[in-house]
Image (spheres, rainbow, N blue to C red):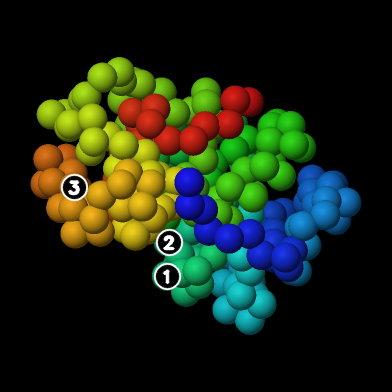
């Protein structure tokens, strides 16, 4: 299995949340974890964008309810700092918000009631390129249930490719893991996009979560 190599440097985190006990608690929690470092904090969407451009974090933890936040902030962060992973950490909300955040470009979605170890593990996994959503959110995204077998006319090999895309694998990595050529991997991706009526890898990853094919955190 080929994963993005773990850097010896700590994962640099930008925290976007309301000031107060909640944010201070998160900073204290992450400060105690080897391999993680909060490099900056923001109270608003505008401040988050400015800081993201300056500090170039590896992961941005976003509470969408901050002023100037929401899906627009997630999309702007993805556009302005494309190399970073966006992790939404928020209070319980409606199911549409989960799907909306993923479509906007978020790589993870957790509730603030999650266990500290789940949060740390999710930060590490989205940094590696995986798409991670709390297990209780996945079955209801956009009204889709978890599916068995080969949904939507997909072959078993195409389902394998979808799972690997959701884990952040590149085309060469997919080819290596499946024992196929990179050209064949590209052909599988083209077929998947055509069958599902999707446009890009982010949408494939979102589909994987909707169908229960992606990595899930059991919280």
Which of the 4 image quarters holds residue 147?
Answer: top left
User: Can residue 24 be seen from the camera position used here?
Assistant: no
Which of the 4 image quarters holds residue 46?
Answer: bottom right
User: Can residue 74 be seen from the camera position used here?
Assistant: yes
* In this picture, residue 67 sits left or right of residue 78: right
Determine contact: label 2, label 3, CB under 8 Å. Answer: no
Sequence-first disc among 2 and 3? 2
Q: Residues within 10 Å of mark 1 (few under 14, many from 20)?
A: few
Sequence-first disc among 1 and 3? 1
**Residue 199 tag number:** none
Tell me the distance, in whole angstroms, between the alpha carbons under discs 1 and 3. Answer: 27 Å
Q: Residue at x 36, y 52 (%)?
A: 176
Is residue 102 shown above or below 83? above
Tell me the distance, in whole angstroms, between the alpha carbons under discs 1 and 2. Answer: 6 Å
Is residue 85 shown above or below 195? below
Between 76 and 213, the one lying in front of the other is 213
Q: Secondary structure at mark 3?
A: helix
Between 165 and 66, the one lying in front of the other is 165
Q: Secondary structure at mark 2?
A: helix
Q: Residue at x 59, y 38 (%)?
A: 110
Closer to viewer: mark 1 or mark 3: 3
Q: Which residue is mark 1?
A: 79
- The spot of residue 211 in percent (x, y) is 33, 28
Q: Which residue is mark 2?
A: 75
Q: Residue at x 71, y 44 (%)?
A: 120
Q: Which residue is mark 3?
A: 188
Tell me the distance, in whole angstroms, between the alpha carbons under discs 2 and 3. Answer: 28 Å
Determine contact: label 1, label 2, CB under 8 Å. Answer: yes
Closer to viewer: mark 2 or mark 3: 3
């Amino acid at each position: 299995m080929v994963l993005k190599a773990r850097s010896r440097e700590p994962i640099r985190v930008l925290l976007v949340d309301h000031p107060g006990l909640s944010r201070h608690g998160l900073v204290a929690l992450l400060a105690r974890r080897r391999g993680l470092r909060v490099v900056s904090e923001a109270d608003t969407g505008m401040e988050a964008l400015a800081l993201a451009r300056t500090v170039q974090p590896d992961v941005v933890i976003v509470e969408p309810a901050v002023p100037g936040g929401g899906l627009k902030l997630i999309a702007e962060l993805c556009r302005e700092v494309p190399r970073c992973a966006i992790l939404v950490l928020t209070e319980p909300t409606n199911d549409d918000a989960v799907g909306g955040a993923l479509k906007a470009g978020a790589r993870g979605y957790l509730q603030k009631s999650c266990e500290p170890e789940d949060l740390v593990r999710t930060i590490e996994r989205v940094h590696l390129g995986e798409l991670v959503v709390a297990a209780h959110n996945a079955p209801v995204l956009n009204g889709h249930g978890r599916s068995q077998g080969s949904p939507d006319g997909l072959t078993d090999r195409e389902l394998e490719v979808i799972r690997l895309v959701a884990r952040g694998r590149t085309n060469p990595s997919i080819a290596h893991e499946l024992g196929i050529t990179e050209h064949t991997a590209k052909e599988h991706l083209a077929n998947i996009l055509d069958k599902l009526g999707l446009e890009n890898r982010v949408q494939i990853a979102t589909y994987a979560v909707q169908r229960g094919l992606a990595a899930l955190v059991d919280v």
